[in-house]
Image (cartoon, rainbow, N blue to C red):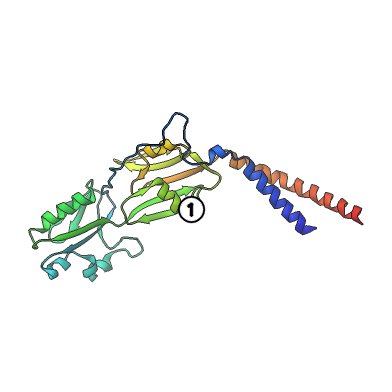
Amino acid sequence: MSRNLSLLSVALCGALLFSCVSQKKIVYFQQKSDTTNAIPFDTTFITVIHPNDILNIFVTSTNIEASQYFNFSDRPELMASANPSSPGANGYLVDAYGFIQFPLVGAVKVGGLTSHAAHDTIVQLLSKYIGTPTVKLNIQNFKVTVLGEVNRPSIYYVSSEKMTLPDALSLAGDMTLYGNRENVMVIREENGKKSFQTVNFTSRDFFSSPYYNLHSNDIVYVEPIRGKKFQIENWYKILPIFLSTVSVAMVFVGIFKK
């Protein structure tokens, strides 16, 4: 009898919790009646370097010994000074003014540049010290924080220097059933100010949003739907009454069977 009671309780709990969520509120990328199947979106987005970014810069040239002077992997004293607990720590930190301190060269302005532009700048400067330098440069600590109604909230690092909002939510295990897909917030720091913008995942217009492509250090917050708290509070109020009623019913059923 207790086993049947438990199964019945679980079934009713699931029914009460999930029946109140409308399908229209959980289906992604719905098509409006007046839209086409082709949605324009920005394919030219390129990440730029910001303060506190950590750059991996690897230099090679015809003079191997000279090239090694600029590389963290070839200089144990630089490796030891970096913070091993931080992903991408073995690299050049961009300071608050957008500069990195590069051996021999000194301060190099890279803030606000794309990786490609920063690469060209460093190649040009290194040409004064070593012959035919080849430089590989990328941002090592591109990260996005995902919070709220997702299955795996966390800080996510990528090495590709590019992440879309769907990518970030996929890494976080997607939104939970109670995530508000119509009001996903992206918090971004620009020019020393925090901007707060929302996107609607239930509409295909989302793909044309300027927040489709995320910037490093963006925060994605999925708020709970308004009914979640109400449903949970009422379920806890109803549950004792429900269990008592079922228990009494099971007792009467047992009596009648005897």
Residue lying furthest top in this view? 34
Crowd class of label 1 (few under 14; some 14 to 19; many from 20; radius 10 Å):
few
Q: How many marks overall?
A: 1
Residue plotted at (48% across, 44% down): 222
Q: Is residue 145 above or below residue 29?
A: below
Q: Is residue 91 above or below residue 230?
A: below
Residue 74 place in picture, x, y as percent = 21, 69
Q: Is residue 232 visible?
A: no
The part of the image, by quadrant, that contains residue 154 is bottom left
Residue plotted at (26% across, 47% down): 48
Question: In the displayed structure, does residue 145 sit left or right of residue 242?
Answer: left
The part of the image, by quadrant, that contains residue 206 is top left
Q: Is residue 233 visible?
A: yes
Viewer-proximal residue, 96 or 125? 125
Which residue is label 1 attached to? Answer: 173
The C terminus - image quarter:
bottom right
The N terminus - image quarter:
bottom right
Residue plotted at (40% across, 38% down): 196
Viewer-proximal residue, 145 or 96? 145
Residue 241 place in picture, x, y as percent = 76, 45
Residue plotted at (87% across, 55% down): 254
Q: Is residue 105 above or below residue 80?
A: above
Q: Secondary structure at mark 1?
A: loop
Residue lying furthest front in this view? 37
- The three-letter code of the residue at mark 1 reads Gly
Viewer-proximal residue, 49 or 16? 16
Residue 142 place in picture, x, y as percent = 33, 53
Residue 203 place in picture, x, y as percent = 46, 36
Question: In the displayed structure, does residue 92 sit left or right of residue 233?
Answer: left
